[in-house]
Amino acid sequence: MDFFTPIVDDPYWFGQIAAANALSDVYAMGGEPKTAMNLVAFPLKEMDLSILRQILEGGIEKMKEAGVVLVGGHSIEDSELKYGLSVTGFVHPDRVLVKGGLKSGDRLILTKPLGTGVINTAIKADMAGPELIDRITRLMAELNRDAAHVMAGFLVHACTDITGFGLLGHLAEMILNTGHGILLRAGDVPIMPEAIEFAGMGLLPAGAYKNKEFRLSMVESSPGLDSLMVDLFFDPQTSGGLLIAISEEHAARLLESLIDKGVTQSRIIGEVISGSEEKIFII
């Protein structure tokens, strides 16, 4: 179950993004989403019902794309607009993927670029142009379905999707109580170039600072690394990509298969290491 307040002005695209974000949790566990229920909070006295209609249309279109059936939902009147889904999916018990299944030597593959939090902050400040707004909106509305379907053909050890805790926050969750650490190669992490530019201007969302405060003790970065990159790795994402852990032996073939399927911004960004006191080392 996942829902949030609008992050784009267009109601239809907000519905698309919120639905894609909710569906992503099932894909990240190796499952196939099948049914969903709408979750709506709507300020009836302040907004026209046509806005709600457009939001729901966007959500339904995204569910149709995913092959998901809408079976109902629940709405309440609220002072703040919110929308999302409660999703039910299927997966064989032996194929359920969790965050903590990492093995030493695993390679980590990220399937979408980072930067949505920073760019959305720039959009709110009226500093992003129409082309960038369109591109970031479509990226957030993009399903993780194709990546999940490719991943299903491989022996994957762990998976999560990158959302509100940022890349480093979710990596920290993956190594907690495992005895493993992460070696993250900053130059290999896909980041939208505009996000780097805006972050350099100080346009970081509040969530990035909260994520950093919570998990920075688990992070060690090379002396020569720009601190801006660490901030970007804490940037909270909306409907981010999958982060997949797979053996070194199969990582290159999985990456090639992802790119062949159209998940073209996928990259190997690091590896799992042992005996590192559950730390994330950024080089």
Image (spheres, grey):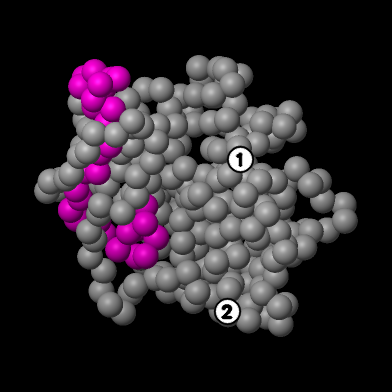
Mark 1: give few (<14), some (14-19) or many (20+) Cα within 10 Å.
few
- Give the percent coordinates (x, y) of residue 235: 60, 45
Amino acid on which disc 1 is placed:
Ala
| View extreme (right): residue | 223
Magenta extent? 24-52
Q: Are marks 2 and 1 in contact (CB under 8 Å)?
A: no
- Give the percent coordinates (x, y) of residue 224: 87, 52
Amino acid on which disc 2 is placed:
Asn
Describe residue 12's horizontal placement relative to residue 117 as left or right: left
Q: CA distance from mark 2 to mark 1?
A: 28 Å
For residue 254, the mark is: none
Comparing marks 2 and 1, which lies closer to the viewer?
1
Look at the image and tell me whether residue 259 can be seen: no
**SS label for mark 2:** loop
Quadrant, the C terminus: bottom right
* Residue at 27% from the left image edge and 47% from the top image edge: 85
Circle 2 is placed at which residue position? 177
* Residue at 46% from the left image edge and 24% from the top image edge: 134
For residue 206, the mark is: 1
- Give the percent coordinates (x, y) of residue 239: 43, 45
- Report the number of discs: 2
Look at the image and tell me whether residue 84 can be seen: yes
Give 209 or 174, whichever is nearer the viewer: 209
Marked residue nearer the N-terminal end (2 or 1) = 2
